[in-house]
Amino acid sequence: MFSFKKLSRGSLRLRQQLRRDLSSGNKEDIMSVFRYAMTLALVAAVLIGSFGSPALAYRSSTSDCVDRDYYSGCEKEPTGGMMMWDALVMRPVGIVGTALGSVVWVVSYPFAYWGGNTDASTEALVQNPFEWTFQRPLGEF
């Protein structure tokens, strides 16, 4: 039967064991090989993704982007996929966030009143989520 302890014995023995396990036709052996392959693929994806993130963060000054008053700096024109993601996922999340912020605001308003920061709490809990959900252009984050 395949086990992860056999990995340390070398790649030749591992390949031979994998061949034996797969040729035996035992379902448990095949599943253990499949789990090993999936684990290896996941680890590779995580490692590759962690090295690729800084490269994706780079923004070229010559890219096709549009300056907007809503944003600081230069943003790319939203694509159809970004607009669909915004309309189907992010806007409903924003609606829930606005509702939850409003409930928290109602509960915390007396404390904010006594503390003298009702304007700051209103802006943070109600106004900002509302503007992000309903007043921002579709597809622009």
Image (cartoon, helix red, strand yellow):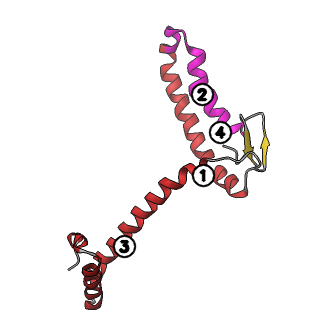
| Residue under numbered circle 3 | 37
Q: What is the spatial separation of the Cα atoms under label 3 and label 1, in whole angstroms?
A: 28 Å
Q: Which residues are magenta?
A: 112-136
Q: Earlier in the sequence, mark 3 or mark 1?
A: 3
Is 67 situated left or right of 130 in this image?
A: right
Task: Tell me the number on the disc at residue 133.
Answer: 4
Q: Main secondary structure of the magenta part?
A: helix
* Disc 1 element: helix
Residue type marked 1: Leu
Circle nearer the viewer, 2 or 1: 1
* Residue at 27% across, 79% down: 14
Say whether disc 3 or disc 2 marks the residue closer to the N-terminus: 3
Secondary structure under badge 3? Answer: helix
Q: Secondary structure at mark 4?
A: helix
Q: How many labels, in total?
A: 4
**Residue 87 point in image, percent of width and height:** 66, 50
Q: Is residue 126 magenta?
A: yes
Vertical arrangement, residue 68 with respect to residue 5, above or below: above
Q: Whole-Å distance between the Cαs marked 3 and 2? A: 48 Å
Looking at the picture, which amino acid does disc 4 mark?
Answer: Thr
- CA gap, disc 2 to disc 1? 33 Å
Q: Nearer the viewer, mark 3 or mark 2?
A: 3
* Upstream in sequence: badge 1 or badge 4: 1
Vertically, is 62 above or below 107? below
Q: Quadrant of the C terminus?
A: top right
Q: Nearer the viewer, residue 7 or 126?
A: 7
Label 1: which residue?
Answer: 56
Q: Is residue 141 above or below residue 32?
A: above
In the image: residue 119, left or right of residue 139: left
